[in-house]
Image (spheres, rainbow, N blue to C red):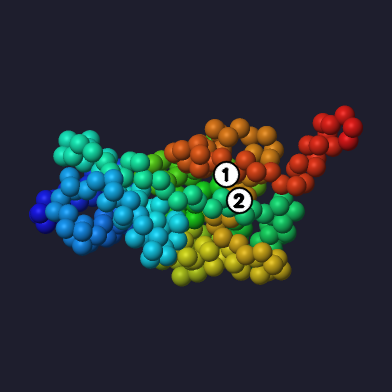
C-alpha cells in the first residue's frame, strides 16, 4: 500500500514540475495537501486511492471544517486532491474521482484595493529626487504602475529583457510563461535615467544583469521592492498601505475604467484564465458619476 501511494504521489509531483512547470513552493503545497489526505486514509482504514468513495471525500471535507480551517485553505486542499485524482484518471491508474462532486466552500468576494489617480500622482511626486536611490525608486514605481507586472517579475527582470526601442519588456511569469508587456513614455524616461545614471554607480564592481539593484550593488529582491514602496508611501504621507500587488490592481482598474477591453488586460497581466481578470470590472464611484453625467439625458 505505502509504496503504491508514494509512487502515485511521486508521479504527480513530477507532472507538476515537468509538464506544468510549477514552482517549488506550489508543488510542495500539493504534496502537503495530499500527504494530509493519506493520514486521513490511514485513520479510516483505506488502503488505496481506489477504495476512496464520495462518502469518504465528504467525511474528509467535514473533518477540515471541524478543524476550523479557513475557507480558502479548505478549497485549496480539495482542489489539490481533485487535481491529483484527475491526473491518475488521465494516466489510467484510476477510473473514478470521488472529489469531482464535492462542493467547495464559497470564497468571500473581496474587491481588490487600488489607488485613485490623484493618489498615484501624490506617490509619483514623492518619488522625485536627485540621489541614485531616488532615481532607482522612481523607475521601479513607474514600471510597476505602468505595466502591472508582479513584484517577482520586476525583481527578476534582466537588462536583455528591456527593449527601449519598442518600449516593451519580456516578462517571465508564473510557470515560466513569457509575455511581452509595453510601457509608456513616463516609465521609459524613468528607466532610461536609472539605467544610464544610477545603476552603473550602484552596481559598483559587481557583474550581473539584473535591472534593479540595491545600495550594495546586488540584485534587488521582492522584499526589497516592498520596503522601497513603503518608504514612498511614508514620504507621501498617505494613510493607505501599499503593496506591489496593489499597484497591479491599480494598473488593471485604471485601464478598464478608461475603456480598455478585458481580453487585453488579461494578456497584459499574464492571467491564463479570464475569470482572474473579471475581478477588476468594478469601477470607482467617481467613474460611475462621470459616466452618468456624460450619458444620461436627465443628468
Q: Is residue 189 in view from this perspective?
A: no
* Disc number placed over residue 111 in the picture, else none: 2
Is residue 283 among the parts visible in the rendering? yes
Secondary structure under the numbered disc 2 in the rendered image? loop
Residue 197 x %, y %: 57, 58
What residue is drawn where x is 34% and y is 60%?
63
**Label 1 with label 2: CB-CB less than 8 Å:** yes
Q: How many marks?
A: 2
Residue 80 lies, in percent from the top left, at: 32, 50
**Badge 2: few (under 14), some or many (20 or more) residues near its Cα, within 10 Å?**
few
**On the image, numbered disc 1 is attached to which residue?**
279
Residue at position x 87%, y 29% in the image: 297
Q: Position of residue 280 (x, y in %)?
A: 60, 44
Q: List the single residue furthest toward the top.
A: 297
Residue found 14% across the figure and 54% down from its top: 47
| Looking at the image, residue 108 lies above or below residue 295 | below
Quadrant the N terminus occupies: bottom left
| Crowd band around label 1 with a 10 angstrom C-alpha radius: few (<14), some (14–19), many (20+) | some
Picture coordinates of residue 283, whole percent (x, y): 69, 43
Left or right for 37, reference 180: left
> Which quarter of the figure is the C terminus placed in?
top right
Q: Which mark is residue 180?
A: none
Residue 125 or residue 106, whichever sits in front: 106
- Marks 1/2: CA distance? 7 Å
The residue at 42%/48% (across/down) is 104
The relative height of residue 127 versus residue 180 in the rendered view (above or below) is: below
Q: Is residue 298 left or right of residue 285?
A: right
Q: Work out whether mark 1 precedes mark 2 in sequence or the reverse, and give the earlier one.
A: 2
| Towards the viewer: 287 or 177 | 287
Task: Check disc 1 and report its element: helix, strand or loop.
Answer: helix
Quadrant for residue 30, please give it: bottom left
Residue farthest along the front direction in this orientation? 55
Amino acid at each position: 500500500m505505502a509504496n503504491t501511494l508514494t509512487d502515485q504521489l511521486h508521479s504527480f509531483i513530477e507532472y507538476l514540475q515537468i509538464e506544468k512547470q510549477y514552482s517549488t513552493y506550489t508543488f510542495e503545497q500539493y504534496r502537503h495537501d495530499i500527504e494530509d489526505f493519506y493520514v486521513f486514509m490511514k485513520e479510516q482504514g483505506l488502503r488505496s486511492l481506489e477504495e476512496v468513495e464520495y462518502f469518504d471525500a465528504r467525511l474528509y471535507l467535514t473533518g477540515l471544517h471541524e478543524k476550523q480551517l479557513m475557507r480558502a485553505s479548505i478549497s485549496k486542499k480539495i482542489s489539490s486532491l481533485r487535481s491529483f485524482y484527475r491526473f491518475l484518471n488521465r494516466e489510467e491508474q484510476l477510473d473514478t474521482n470521488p472529489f469531482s462532486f464535492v462542493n467547495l466552500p464559497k470564497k468571500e468576494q473581496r474587491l481588490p484595493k487600488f489607488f485613485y489617480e490623484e493618489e498615484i500622482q501624490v506617490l509619483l511626486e514623492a518619488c522625485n529626487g536627485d540621489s541614485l536611490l531616488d532615481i532607482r525608486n522612481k523607475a521601479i514605481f513607474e514600471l510597476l504602475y505602468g505595466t502591472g507586472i508582479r513584484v517577482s517579475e520586476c525583481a527578476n527582470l534582466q537588462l536583455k529583457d528591456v527593449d527601449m526601442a519598442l518600449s516593451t519588456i519580456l516578462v517571465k511569469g508564473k510557470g515560466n510563461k513569457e509575455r511581452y508587456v509595453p510601457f509608456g513614455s513616463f516609465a521609459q524616461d524613468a528607466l532610461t535615467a536609472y539605467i544610464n545614471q544610477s545603476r552603473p554607480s550602484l552596481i559598483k564592481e559587481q557583474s550581473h544583469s539584473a535591472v534593479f539593484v540595491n545600495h550594495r550593488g546586488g540584485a534587488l529582491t521582492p522584499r526589497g521592492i516592498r520596503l522601497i514602496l513603503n518608504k514612498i508611501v511614508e514620504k507621501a504621507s498617505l494613510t493607505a498601505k501599499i503593496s506591489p500587488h496593489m499597484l497591479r490592481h491599480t494598473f488593471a482598474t485604471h485601464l478598464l475604467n478608461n475603456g480598455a477591453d478585458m481580453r487585453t488586460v488579461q494578456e497584459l497581466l499574464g492571467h491564463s484564465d479570464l475569470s482572474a481578470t473579471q475581478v477588476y470590472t468594478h469601477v470607482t464611484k467617481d467613474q460611475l458619476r462621470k459616466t452618468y453625467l456624460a450619458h444620461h439625458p436627465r443628468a
